[in-house]
Image: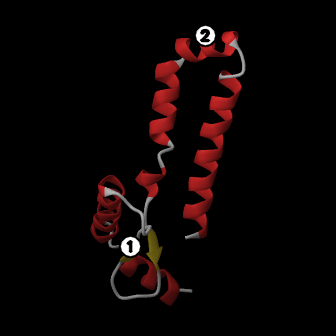
Amino acid sequence: NIALKTAEGTANYITNEIKNIFSNNLYGKFCYLVSYFLFKKIKKSLDPRKYNGGIFIGLNSPVIKSHGGADALAFYYSIKLSAKILRGNLIQRIKSNIENE
């Protein structure tokens, strides 16, 4: 959960700083217009909803905790993470690694 909140805060901070830099003057606004699609792509990759869900380790099956304010997209990515954990047999692999220590 700490990593999740840190990533979310970092993404929001970067987005706000970029907006502030480009809105300071006319030249900044022009540069923003020229690079609009690049920033849109970066913002999409930093969307905290894509990284929604913290994994509880130490249980016999995966448990993913989402934000209380998670929307449909964030919830979708949490389900996608659960499926990835199940397909990759992560819980059993962690148990095996611990037993072999």
Of 100 and 74, nearer the camera is 74
How packed mark 1 is, by other alpha carbons closer than 10 Å (few <14, some 14-19, many 20 or more), is: some
Q: In the image, is residue 16 above or below residue 94?
A: above
Tell me whether circle 2 and circle 1 mark residues in contact (CB < 8 Å): no
The answer to which of marks 2 and 1 sits earlier in the sequence is: 2
Q: Going by the image, does 19 lie left or right of 82? A: right
Q: CA distance from mark 2 to mark 1?
A: 48 Å
Q: Amino acid at mark 1?
A: Leu
User: Quadrant location of the C terminus?
Assistant: bottom right
Q: Secondary structure at mark 1?
A: helix
Q: Going by the image, does 62 lie left or right of 12? A: left
Percent position of residue 50, x then y: 41, 52
Q: How is the image coloured?
A: secondary structure
User: Quadrant location of the N terminus?
Assistant: bottom right
Residue at the (63%, 50%) spot, across then down: 10
Percent position of residue 51, x then y: 45, 56
Residue at the (43%, 60%) spot, across then down: 52
Percent position of residue 96, x then y: 43, 83
Q: In the image, is residue 26 above or below residue 57?
A: above
Q: In the image, is residue 99 above or below residue 42?
A: below
Residue holding disc 1: 90
Residue holding disc 2: 30
Place residue 82 in its image quadrant.
bottom left
Q: Going by the image, does 29 lie left or right of 61? A: right
